[in-house]
Image (cartoon, rainbow, N blue to C red):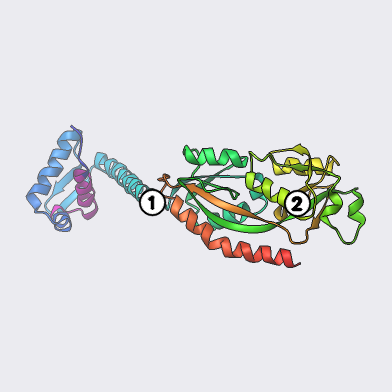
Amino acid sequence: MKPTLNQLINFCTVAETGNIGKAASQLNISQPPLSRQIAQLETILGAKLFNRAAKGVSLTLAGEQFLLDCRAMLAMLEQACNNVRAIASGQKGVLKLGATMYASYSVVPHVAMQHRNTCSDVELHFQERVPSDLHAALQDGRLDAAISFSETATPGIHSLVLLREPLIAALPANHPQVQHEHFRLESLCDDPFITVPRESAPMLYDSILHQCLKAGFSPQIGLEASVQQTVMNFVAHGVGVALIPASMENAQLRGVVYRKLENPNMVENMLMWSAKNTNPALPGFVNLCRSIRDKLDAAQAGRINN
């Protein structure tokens, strides 16, 4: 037979008051049942916990140790209850966030900083993936949320636009057009373009293609790479030119020169999550992202106007 939680609480109260009568009053029970509970507890443990006297009770050596252990157990129990409540309310736990490498240069740092400042008890587990992998990971529950390029609507996937920013041109530092004061996209009509595969990021691919068509030419696709950093590396080594989201300029890659476009197409960075996701921390994360959206837009507007 093992002691009950009620017996442990009652024992601690008697030990702390040093008087069964006072303890009974605090516990809102009569004295005889409390005395019987203490006696039963001693029988279960096979040890005397109290020295009885006319003026009250005092702990034996065994009782002193048992009080220390009971306090520790009750504190652990209280903490366990608090943890459960915090996790159930979304104030504590783990949130798995996936994002493209591009998002790591635009939205993700802002989200991560705000999350750390306001939701430090929710661990953010970050994974970098190509856009096509993010959708699959959301749908099968490997990710709670993802930040990527905008995509066509997918049943069961909610989305929130976090940032809209322009495409810019990325050229090798030794490209002839770098020397021209006024850059025009059509001057790249004979250059090989490095771009993402359409199956990896269809909306970005289409936006790049449309930007070139607006300039009067269809781009020659020289090479495709699923990761924006790889696209940039190819440009740096003179393999070709590229149209990239403006935030990729933050990569500050040596050997690459950036040029603004006239009437640039805008690229959307979106937060996405599954309607079936039951992680209690997810609604708070979505609200956090919604709260910083205006700040991101304002910062981007400043970059465009500079």
How many angstroms separate mark 2 from mark 1 (CA)? Answer: 53 Å
- Quadrant containing the C terminus is bottom right
Which residue ends up furthest to the left in the rendered image? 32
**Label 2 SS:** helix
Residue at 24% in and 53% down: 16
Can you identify the residue that label 1 sits on? 86
- Quadrant containing the N terminus is top left
Does the magenta portion include 15?
yes
Q: Residues within 10 Å of mark 2 (few under 14, many from 20)?
A: few
200 left or right of 25 in image: right
Quarter where residue 125 is shown: top right
* Main SS, magenta residues: helix
Q: Position of residue 262 (x, y in %)?
A: 78, 61
* Residue closer to the observer: 46 or 145: 145
Where are the magenta residues, as a range? 6-21
* Residue closer to the observer: 190 or 79: 190
Q: Residue flagged by tag 2: what amino acid is it? A: Leu
Q: Does 3 sit above or below residue 71?
A: above
* Residue closer to the observer: 267 or 186: 186
216 left or right of 278 in image: right
**Label 1 SS:** helix
The label on residue 213 is 2
* Dot placed on the residue nearer the N-terminal end, 2 or 1: 1
Does the magenta portion include 176?
no
Residue at 76% in and 51% down: 212
* Residue closer to the observer: 267 or 18: 267
Q: Residue flagged by tag 1: what amino acid is it? A: Ala
Q: Position of residue 255 (x, y in %)?
A: 85, 47
157 left or right of 31 in image: right
